[in-house]
Structures are given as structure tokens and as C-alpha cells.
Image (cartoon, rainbow, N blue to C red):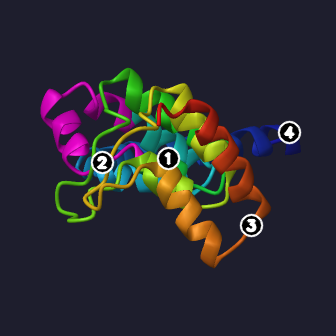
Amino acid sequence: MSRKSKIGLAVGLAALVVVGAGGKLVHELSQDTVNGLISCYGSAQTPIAWMCKKVLVVKLRSAENVALLNKHGAARFPVMLSNEVAGREMLRILVSHGVDVNAVDQDSSARFTPLHLAAMDATLWQVELLLEHGADPDAIDASGMTPLDRARKVQQEYPDAGRTAIIQMLEARTSR
């Protein structure tokens, strides 16, 4: 057998192993929770993350899964990612399947919307992304504070240029 044939055979066998393992992985991923898939998809831009994304999209076709995500304020997950490209894509996918960008985590007494959480951080793209998808800058949390109020409060304790830009953006968009 020629060297070229041996290489071709090795590549073919490797592909069969990968496809077989991939099938098992897809089965395992399909058994995972929607939150687990979001975490997997957001972890890195790898083939496994790609598969998590594909399985997530299928699971988001279920109204029950979307309702569960809304119950837990799932629009916050994409803006918690450090990777802006992945965060933007993930939020687009979630919103296109009915996830509410203004939903709060029903298990939290603070009643923060994803915009409240992003406004307290110092990463402008997160706030921009939520506003682009319809986040309400006038939403009130359990303490009667808007995302702008929260950003100002955190800024007093922990000044940051990124948060200054967030405050300016929210000032331009709030009705108060």
C-alpha cells in the first residue's frame, strides 16, 4: 500500500471515529438542560460550542423551554459573556425564539432585569445589545431603581470610564 493510500485510510478512519463520537455527543447534549446548553455554547467558539448552539436552537422551539428561560431572566446570560460576538449571537437567537429581554429572575428578590445587571457592570456593548433588542431603560427593580439609578450608585462606589459611558447612554434613553 502506498504512503498516500495509508494517509487517506488513516484520515478516513479518523473521520469515522469523530462522526461516531459526535453522534454520541449530540445525544448527550440533547439530554442537557437549556441553561446547560447556553453555558456550553457561550464557553468558547469550538466544535462542541457549535453543537451546543444547534441543540439549543432545537430546544428553543419548545414554548415550555422558552417560558422556563423567561422565568429565570435568561436574557442576562449572553451579556455575561466576555466574548461580545458570542454574546450578540446568543441574544439574537434567544430573542428570536421568544426570550424576553425584560424578564426578571423569579427566584431573585432583587427583581433585576438583564439591563439592571449590565448597567452595573462597566462593559458598554452589553447595555447597547440589550437596548437594541428592546430592553426597557425605565424598568424598576424591587427597590424602585432603574438601570440608570443602579449604574449611578455603583459608579459612586467604583468609578469606571466604561460605566460613565453607560450612564450617558441610559440618560439619553430614559423618560425620567
What secondary structure is found at the residue carrying circle 2?
A: loop
Mark 4, mark 3: which one is toward the viewer? Answer: 3
What secondary structure is found at the residue carrying circle 4?
A: helix
The mark that comes first in sequence, 3 or 2, is 2
Q: Which residue is mark 3?
A: 160
Q: Which residue is mark 4?
A: 4
Residue at 17% x, 62% y is 107
Mark 4, mark 1: which one is toward the viewer? Answer: 1
Q: How many marks?
A: 4
Amino acid under label 2? Gly
Q: Residue furthest top?
A: 96
Q: Quick one: label 3, few (<14), some, or many (20+) residues within 10 Å?
A: some
Determine which of the numbered discs, if any, sits on residue 78 in the image.
1
Q: Residue 161: horizontal and vertical position, in percent?
A: 79, 60
Q: CA distance from mark 2 to mark 1?
A: 11 Å
Residue at 61% x, 40% y is 171
Amino acid under label 1? Pro
Residue 143 shows in the view: yes
Amino acid under label 3? Asp
